[in-house]
Image (cartoon, grey):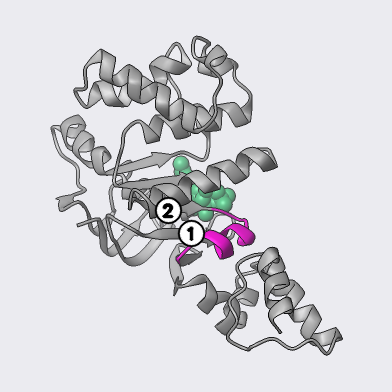
Amino acid sequence: MGISLKEVNFSYNPKRKGTKYALKDINLEISPSDEFIAIIGETGSGKSTLASLFNALKIPTSGEAYVSGIKIKKVRKRRENYNKIRKHVGLVFQMSDYQLFEETVLKDVMFAPLNFKKTKEEALKIAKSSLELVEIDESLFGVSPFTLSGGEKKLVSIAGILAMEPDILIFDEPTAGIDPSTKKKLLKLFRSLNEIKHKSVILITHDMNIVNEYAKRVILMKDGTISFDSSPYDLFVNNRKIVKDANIDLPDSYKIIDLLKEKTSVRFNENIKIKNLGNIVEELINE
Ligand SMILES: Nc1ncnc2c1ncn2[C@@H]1O[C@H](COP(=O)(O)OP(=O)(O)OP(=O)(O)O)[C@@H](O)[C@H]1O
Ligand SMILES: [Mg+2]
């Protein structure tokens, strides 16, 4: 059933006169399996706000939002309802400090499985394997998450979501502040969650190279509305005006293709899909 938003508006201060809406007129369907979505858009365009609606951290001011068929609304048994939703949708916050709260790294990652009624032994096993996936060293298991570096905090909060084993995983700028080699490993992990485990992965990112190489679908936010929802190819190849108007950088590979087309006699097939720089080299050799 996934995520379904119908005519959703959201305001942080709905009672204030002349309130500004952070999200306007959002209609969106996200499948609970096999999606790899990038949410992009300028700072303040509403990406994080949208993500927090996806797992019921926020409730629509008007319109309807459903997660796995459960309507997101104000309810008395708030925690119970949220737990049901968070079994389906896990969100890694942009700011890791808001996500981490336990005394130690290991306890933090064990929290979700314990909350979902796993035994202590099972929770320990899941937590250890999740931490291993993000390559957090065992020597850090016993330390307070608040003493970690920014990047380590991010990785621990990602492990915390992996340990929840949700169908849909949302990562709000997961690669910001992460070194290049760890970044590559994280992206590989996201791809394997998507391709092998058939999870739906949603990445919020400003990095168009990541969007181009990994995402199957791209959602562009502009002033609180969805201004584009299609494939990265459709955006970067067929909709250059939208790219320009939204102040989005082109992926490096398309920048180079443009340059080669302009400055050299090298010819490329017009419909060519260039996922990354290595891909250009292959295409050149094939020409
Ligand atoms: N807690 C809040 N109270 C009031 N307004 C807020 C709050 N959080 C965000 N906003 C406003 O809502 C709008 C959307 O913010 P949001 O954080 O969703 O943007 P974003 O696209 O994630 O930006 P960034 O790329 O900087 O992370 C902005 O105008 C922002 O100022
Ligand atoms: Mg944000």
Identify which residue, 194 or 238, lies in the foreground. Answer: 194
* Mark 2 element type: strand
Identify which residue, 124 or 153, lies in the foreground. Answer: 124
What is the quadrant of the N terminus in the image?
A: bottom left
Q: Which mark is residue 38?
A: 1
Tell me where residue 64 sits by quadrant: bottom left
Say if mark 1 contacts mark 2, CB within 8 Å.
yes
Query: Which amino acid type corresponds to the residue marked 2 in the rendered image?
Result: Ile
Identify which residue, 47 or 184, lies in the foreground. Answer: 184
Residue 33 in sight: yes
The structure residue drawn at horizontal position 73% and vertical position 77%, both measured from the top left corner, is 285
| Residue 65 located left or right of residue 39 | left
Q: Any magenta on residue 96?
A: no
Residue 15 in sight: no
Magenta stretch in the rendered image: 205-216
Q: Earlier in the sequence, mark 1 or mark 2?
A: 1
Q: Which mark is residue 202?
A: 2
Give the farthest residue toward the right.
263
| Residue 147 located left or right of residue 46 | right
* Residue 203 in picture, x, y percent from top left: 48, 52
